[in-house]
Image (spheres, rainbow, N blue to C red):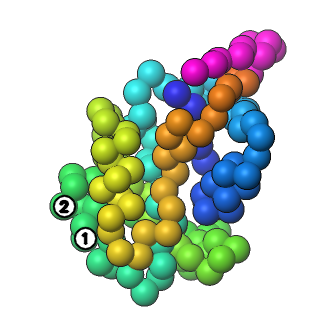
């Protein structure tokens, strides 16, 4: 699996949904055997961020509001905030995705389940192709 980054999941998933092919590109530092090594980002509506943070904590995760360099909440192009959620190892990513989607105010999450047909991973000066 390749761990994503950034915070424009809504836009990325919209573009991916209309693309003929979806290929992930990353370096080997983002490749993990099991998700959870890095925090899972959630794009959330600011009004609901406290409710969402509480619900995510009830699922067993530690939650932190992503902040910009100036210390203010990081704001996406759509005016949303990002919560970085540390779940530890994620055994069932599809089930977690469903739980997250069911929380009012969650706009999108950083789980791109079943979307990519291939990943291109940079490793030691080479590119490794990973297919589903």
| Magenta segment | 122-132
- The residue under the point 42% across, 34% down is 35
Which residue occupies the foreground of this view, 4 or 66? 4
Q: Is residue 5 left or right of residue 42?
A: right
Q: Residue at x 57, y 31 (%)?
A: 2
Outermost right residue: 125
Task: Specify whether 106 is left or right of 120.
Answer: left
Q: Residue furthest bottom?
A: 47
Q: Which mark is residue 127?
A: none
Magenta stretch prevailing secondary structure: strand
Report which quarter residue 79 is drawn in. Answer: bottom right
Image quadrant in which you'd find residue 14: bottom right
Q: Crowding near pointer 1: few (<14 within 10 Å), some, many (20+)?
A: few
Vertical comparison of 111 with 128: above or below: below
According to the image, label 1 marks what residue?
A: 54
- SS of the residue under disc 1: helix
Q: Which quadrant: the C terminus?
A: top right
Q: Secondary structure at mark 2?
A: helix
Residue 40 location in percent, x, y? Answer: 44, 50
Number of numbered callouts drawn:
2
Residue 55 percent coordinates (x, y): 25, 67
Whether residue 48 is visible, yes or no, is yes
Determine contact: label 1, label 2, CB under 8 Å: yes
Q: Residue at x 64, y 72 (%)?
A: 76
From the viewer's perspective, is residue 80 above or below residue 92? below
Q: CA distance from mark 1 to mark 2?
A: 6 Å
Write down the residue under mark 2: 58
> Is residue 55 in the magenta section?
no
Q: Is residue 49 visible from the viewing direction of this image? A: no
């Amino acid at each position: 699996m390749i761990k994503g980054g950034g915070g424009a999941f809504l836009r990325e998933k919209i573009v991916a949904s209309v693309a003929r092919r979806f290929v992930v590109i990353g370096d080997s530092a983002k490749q993990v055997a099991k998700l959870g090594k890095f925090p899972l980002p959630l794009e959330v509506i600011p009004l609901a961020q406290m409710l969402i943070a509480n619900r995510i904590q009830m699922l067993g995760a530690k939650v932190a509001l992503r902040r910009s360099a100036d210390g203010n909440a990081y704001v996406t192009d759509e005016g949303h905030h990002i919560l970085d959620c540390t779940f530890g190892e994620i055994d069932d990513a599809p089930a977690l995705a469903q739980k997250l989607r069911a929380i009012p105010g969650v706009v999108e999450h950083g789980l791109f389940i079943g979307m990519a047909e291939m990943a291109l991973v940079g490793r030691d000066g080479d590119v490794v192709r990973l297919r589903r």
